[in-house]
Image (cartoon, rainbow, N blue to C red):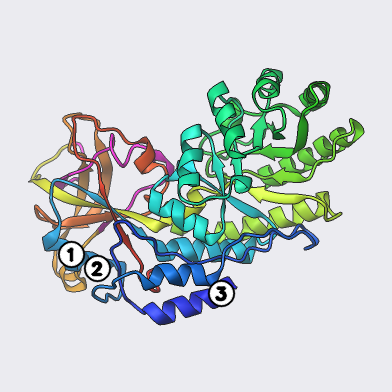
């Protein structure tokens, strides 16, 4: 269904670009959540008519061939003091289709913490995603935008009493745990919840090793499940998270094998597990699409080998994957320095942006090698001399470096630089250090924008 919708949708819009401050550009998604044998179905409750109802309410503006052309055309209109994010909603739809093609047996619960933008959240609802929420606030957000409570997992192993009581009141009953203390809390506040035990996952090839903070060892599983049984709690499955941006497929496959052992322990204790949650850690940048193909193949094979009977629902919690490449940050050059002599480096130009390491670049400084893309025409790029350059943030801090060394054409005050792969975690973790404006938001749909 998704492939059909892709054709219908893009044929209708062609290269029309729409700025949508309060409306949603979306598309339905028919995910068949089959297990390794293809026997398990998940109903998403979305349909094509819902999406076209939204599209009919939009007022398309001018046509552009690419997102780059769109930005060039908008250059003179842009307020220099405030950077802005451009949400390429076509990219979100493309990622949804790629997930269905490569991972049709794993149902995605979008990790809201990656980017809680309301337009994105509503789009995920229309696409049929479930939601991974880690706080009461995130649950409130997705419910406000139409999420089904039964397609939400409260994926934090340490929850407040208030959050548990709220989850109970709105019917969000699927949640994780990893300790006896959390079981006692749940038994008091939400004894009818469906629980998923989180295992540790060990890897030296992840950017953030989340197992330092969350999860239990396999050796602890029997004791924790015995405690749950004594409290008459309903444990329904296993989850894990390999860590942010995992480079090693074997981390997934080995932890899936460990999860199989946990399923066997549960069966001996009288539990019937039906959920296997493989977490996240998937790359979302455009440069790592090839790795995603390899990774999904190995995970599918491991799930099939470890859970061959067709009675387990596979889910995941992608965040970065869904939104990283969909969002660009557009910054303005506020000032520059020409350097004729520098004994310590070959830097010849220094540029100062209207954003900073303490703002939108905080989480991206180490996760991705952020790449500046000057918003210039092809002829301008060809004609201008290129120099080794350094890009500074706008704060008074001497460590506020956005790009220490890169090659850029000669740029001038007021010109724009676009930064790719900025959709995950930049907005959510940024600060307003020195009280500078936070980026604004623009939402566009451009066919073939990749």
- Residue at 11 percent across and 46 percent down: it is 334
First-in-chain label (3 vs 2): 3
In the image, is residue 365 part of the stretch drawn in magenta?
yes
Residue 70 marker: 2
Give the number of marks. 3
Query: What secondary structure is found at the residue carrying circle 3?
Result: helix
- Residue at 54 percent across and 24 percent down: it is 162
Q: Which residue is mark 3?
A: 3
Q: Residues within 10 Å of mark 1 (few under 14, many from 20)?
A: few
Does residue 217 appear to the left or right of 405 in the view shown?
A: right
For this orientation, the residue located farthest to the bottom is 11
Residue 183 appears in the rendering: yes
Query: What secondary structure is found at the residue carrying circle 2?
Result: helix
- Residue at 67 percent across and 49 percent down: it is 315
Does residue 305 appear to the left or right of 1 in the view shown?
A: right
Q: Which residue is mark 1?
A: 74
Mark 3 or mark 2: which is in front?
3
Comparing 273 with 413, the one in front is 273
98 vs 343: above or below: below
- Residue at 51 percent across and 61 percent down: it is 95
Q: Residues within 10 Å of mark 3 (few under 14, many from 20)?
A: some
Residue 7 location (% of width, % of height): 49, 79
Q: Are marks 2 and 1 in contact (CB under 8 Å)?
A: yes
Distance between the Cα atoms at labels 3 and 2?
Answer: 26 Å
What is the magenta range? 344-373
Distance between the Cα atoms at labels 2 and 1?
Answer: 6 Å
Rendered image quadrant of residue 261: top right
Residue 15 location (% of width, % of height): 33, 77
Does residue 198 appear to the left or right of 49 in the view shown?
A: right
């Amino acid at each position: 269904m998704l492939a059909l919708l892709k054709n219908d949708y893009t044929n209708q819009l062609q290269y029309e670009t729409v700025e949508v401050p309060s409306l949603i550009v979306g598309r339905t998604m028919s995910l068949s959540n089959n297990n390794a044998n293809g026997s398990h179905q998940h109903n998403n409750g979305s349909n094509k008519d819902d999406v076209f109802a939204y599209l009919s309410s939009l007022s398309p503006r001018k046509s552009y061939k690419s997102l780059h052309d769109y930005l060039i055309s908008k250059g003179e209109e842009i307020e220099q003091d405030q950077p802005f994010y451009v949400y390429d909603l076509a990219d979100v739809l493309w990622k949804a289709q790629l997930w269905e093609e490569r991972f049709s047996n794993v149902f995605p619960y979008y990790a809201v913490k990656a980017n809680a933008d309301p337009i994105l959240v509503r789009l995920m609802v229309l696409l049929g995603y479930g939601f991974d929420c880690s706080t009461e606030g995130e649950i409130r957000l997705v419910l406000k935008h139409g999420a089904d409570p039964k397609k939400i997992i409260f994926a934090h192993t340490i929850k407040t009493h208030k959050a548990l009581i709220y989850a109970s009141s709105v019917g969000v009953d699927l949640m994780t745990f990893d300790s006896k203390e959390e079981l006692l809390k749940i038994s008091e506040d939400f004894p009818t919840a469906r629980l998923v035990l989180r295992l540790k996952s060990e890897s030296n090839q992840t950017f953030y090793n989340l197992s330092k903070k969350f999860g239990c060892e396999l050796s602890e599983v029997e004791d924790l499940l015995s405690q749950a049984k004594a409290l008459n709690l309903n444990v329904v499955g296993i989850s894990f998270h390999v860590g942010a941006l995992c480079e090693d497929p074997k981390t997934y496959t080995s932890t899936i094998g460990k999860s199989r052992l946990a399923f066997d322990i549960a069966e001996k204790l009288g539990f019937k597990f039906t959920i296997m949650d493989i977490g996240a850690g998937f790359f979302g940048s455009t440069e790592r699409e090839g790795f995603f193909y390899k990774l999904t193949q190995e995970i599918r094979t491991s799930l099939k080998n470890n859970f061959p009977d067709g009675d387990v629902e596979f889910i995941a919690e992608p965040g970065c994957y869904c939104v990283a490449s969909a969002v660009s940050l557009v910054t303005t050059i506020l000032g520059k320095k020409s350097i004729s002599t520098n004994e310590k480096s070959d830097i010849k130009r220094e540029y100062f942006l209207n954003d900073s390491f303490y703002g939108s670049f905080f989480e991206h400084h180490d996760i991705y090698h952020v790449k500046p893309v000057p918003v210039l025409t092809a002829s301008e790029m060809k004609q201008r001399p290129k120099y080794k350059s350094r890009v500074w943030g706008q704060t008074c801090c001497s460590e506020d470096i956005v790009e220490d060394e890169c090659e850029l054409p000669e740029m001038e005050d007021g010109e724009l630089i676009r930064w790719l792969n900025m959709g995950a975690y930049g907005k959510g973790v940024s600060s307003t250090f020195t009280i500078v404006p936070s980026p604004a938001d623009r939402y566009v749909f451009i066919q073939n924008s990749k």
